[in-house]
Image: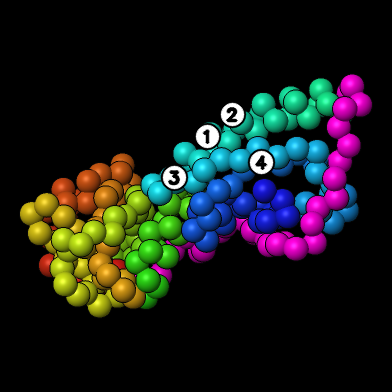
Amino acid sequence: MLPAWRGAGPVQAAISAGDEVTGATTFAIEPDLDSGPVYGVVTETIRPDDTAGELLGRLAVSGAELLTATLDGIADGALTPVPQSRDGVSYAPKISVDDARVRWDLPAAVIERRIRAVTPHPGAWTQIGDLRVKLGPVVIAADGPESLAPGDIHADRRDVWIGTGSAPVRLGQIQPPGKKLMNAADWARGARLDSYVRAS
């Protein structure tokens, strides 16, 4: 919701930052980026497990309704745009593939949000040995290994864990090159994981 997260990736930025609420705004176009006066706003709660794709799907519906109401209000003269506040301005640039690479030295909570923020596009990824793999959302859980160094991988019969800058996270799904997303534990059993001991 303007003036927060002006730019190409506002939903992704809101998830990554840990915001609890986001939304959509209709506004008049000005030369500066997303700086025009506001006609209307709709809010949307960010759920704890929301990916960018899921949140954008809900906003597509509520945002379309807002757009219709805004156009009707402009047409009948009922709406007057209100200048944006000069406080709370933040920017959300477009996320590149390089931006979507997971940095395992960051705290688990930051990694978990950042992965959801780039799911499904451009998709979180990491390097495991000589393989570049995509990752689905991860889970922070108390039943994992007591400690793993950032990027270290531990697999058991049910789960695959990767160390972070704080607590290990459990992988949900992984997509090896040329294949579809699959359960991380199933992948680990077939990947001879002993030869891939770190993610980077």
Q: Which amino acid, by three-letter code, is at mark 1?
A: Gly
Q: Which amino acid, by three-letter code, is at mark 4?
A: Ala
Which residues, given as a range, are shown in magenta?
75-104
Quadrant assignment for the C terminus: bottom left
Name the secondary structure under disc 1. Answer: helix
Q: Which amino acid, by three-letter code, is at mark 2?
A: Val
> Circles 1 and 4: CB distance less than 8 Å?
no
Instruction: From the image, tell me which residue sits under label 2.
Output: 61
**Residues packed near mark 4 inside 10 Å, few (<14), some (14 to 19) or many (20 plus):** many
On residue 47, which mark appears? Answer: 3
Foreground: disc 1 or disc 3 = 3
The CA span between labels 1 and 3 is 13 Å
Q: Nearer the viewer, residue 152 or 1?
A: 1
The CA span between labels 3 and 4 is 16 Å
The CA span between labels 2 and 4 is 10 Å
Determine whether, in the image, residue 94 is placed left or right of residue 18.
right
> Residue 96 in the image: x percent, y percent?
56, 58
Label 1 or label 3, whichever comes before in sequence order:
3
Instruction: From the image, tell me which residue sits under label 1.
Output: 57
**Residues packed near mark 3 inside 10 Å, few (<14), some (14 to 19) or many (20 plus):** few
> Circles 2 and 4: CB distance less than 8 Å?
no
> Residue 116 in the image: x percent, y percent?
43, 52
State the residue at coordinates (44%, 45%).
Answer: 47
Label 1 or label 4, whichever comes before in sequence order:
4
The colouring scheme, among rainbow, by chain, secondary structure or one colour, is: rainbow
